[in-house]
Image (cartoon, helix red, strand yellow):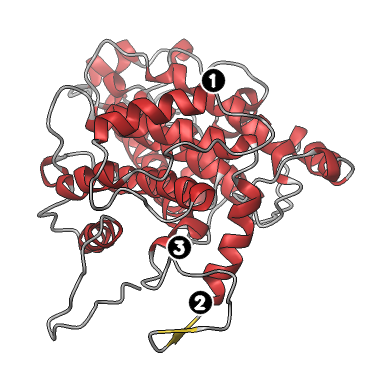
Amino acid sequence: MKRGSIYLTASTSHAPEPDEPPQASWRRWINEESWRRTAFFAFVMDAQHACVFGHSPVLSVIDMRIALPCLESIWECTSVEAWQTLNRPEMAALLFLPTLKSLLRENTVPSHCSEYARFVLLHGLMSLQTHLQAGSKLTLGIEVGKLQASARTHDLQQPVCPGSSNSRSAPVWANTIDAALDLWSTSLFSLQPSLCLEAARTLHRVAQITLHVSVLDIHALAMDPYFPFDHSRPNVDHGGCFFNSNTTKAMTRLHRWVTTDSARKACRYALLLVQETMFNGKRYSAREDNVAPRPWCLYIAVLALWVYGIVTEGPVSDVANPTGAEDYMIRMTRTMQQASPIKPTVGGTNQITGLIRAVRDALTGCRWELLQEAHLVLRRLGGETVLDAGGDSKTLI
């Protein structure tokens, strides 16, 4: 899909001719709505991959100068008569960009927005977050530009937020995104079952986590087969492999991060994601999950909790006699509620082996290669020696 052409087509909407037959109007509307939905699907994938995998985004919110997807009841009409009945002017879809701006100004998402539209707005926040973390000059023409300028004058007062390449300026705009994400959560209220909103619930949590901690930093530590080791000896050869400079830099940022409110927020959101996925009264199995991104989001949440514990208190301390997953969740929930705003909380935050092994088991048997790699990482973090086909320790990259 070539960037630009589909969005130009999707933004073009033609008013019906006075003498246009209803059937022709309906067919033209179907074509226009199809283009819009396809454009938004590409935008959603771009924003989602940038947020949960740390990829560089290709699209931005300002590319999406089109109307949000219409209500599902209108889209699913099977006759022109039903379409004419439901497609009233007051039910017309809102424009994406003004609605996103309204959300950033702490206005709730209108109740007549479709489920797909709410899903798109969440990814709008995720896209904006990713661009700002990368130091983008994207402003939307509203408060974000002022927030970036304000950040430069408040460097010393603001906590570190490694979710951004510019950790000093991030918290000013991050507060706006954080508030908008909280407000967006009201979009999840629905009496009807919805796979779209079910997926959005998990993605909403992971957006909150990655707003407050860099997904690249936590992966730098988790994917280094020689970590943890003696960080006071940066030039030591560990089994034939010199100290990984990416790990060094990530540890430097994360040592500052654990003392901030951003760390406690990331952990609270990670605990909520784990609770909603693993502790909902049913045994969770990723290979049976019909929400494709949820297993990977669960993996990110567990890595965020593991990183907090290992940076705060050192290597995992309960490998031989692991703390139960339930006990860890209870203790960490209480710990985050009582955390000091000045220094990281110490007291078993690194006793996470039981939870790691529970999530490892939940990821067993997945066909997605990336989840198979995540399963191997959790096996290693849970105390297993992971070997390749030749019997050597496997390096996961």
Looking at the rendered image, the disc whose residue lies closer to the viewer, 2 or 1, is 2
Q: Is residue 319 above or below residue 10?
A: below
Label 2 – label 1 distance at C-alpha: 40 Å
Q: Residues within 10 Å of mark 2 (few under 14, many from 20)?
A: some
Picture residue at 57% right of the left edge, 62% below the top: 250
Label 1 – label 3 distance at C-alpha: 32 Å
Q: Kindly identify the amino acid type of the residue bearing the numbered disc 2.
A: Asn
Q: Kindly identify the amino acid type of the residue bearing the numbered disc 3.
A: Leu
Which element carries disc 2, helix, strand or loop? loop
Provide residue 143's location: percent of width, then percent of height: 76, 33
Task: Pick out the residue farthest to the bottom.
Answer: 240
Task: Pick out the residue farthest to the front.
Answer: 321
Q: Which residue is mark 1?
A: 183
Q: Earlier in the sequence, mark 1 or mark 3?
A: 1
Q: Earlier in the sequence, mark 2 or mark 1?
A: 1
Looking at the rendering, which quadrant does residue 107 occupy?
Answer: top right
Label 2 – label 3 distance at C-alpha: 10 Å
Position of 347 with respect to 359 (left or right) is right
Q: Nearer the viewer, residue 135 or 20?
A: 135
Picture residue at 76% right of the left edge, 46% below the top: 169
Task: Assess whether mark 1 and mark 2 are in contact (beta carbons under 8 angstroms).
Answer: no
Looking at the rendering, which quadrant does residue 270 occupy?
Answer: top left
Which element carries disc 3, helix, strand or loop? helix
- Which numbered circle lies on residue 244? 2
Position of 263 with respect to 194 (left or right) is right
Q: Which residue is mark 3?
A: 221
Provide residue 188's location: percent of width, then percent of height: 38, 20
> In the rendered image, is residue 196 in sight?
no
Q: Kindly identify the amino acid type of the residue bearing the numbered disc 1.
A: Leu
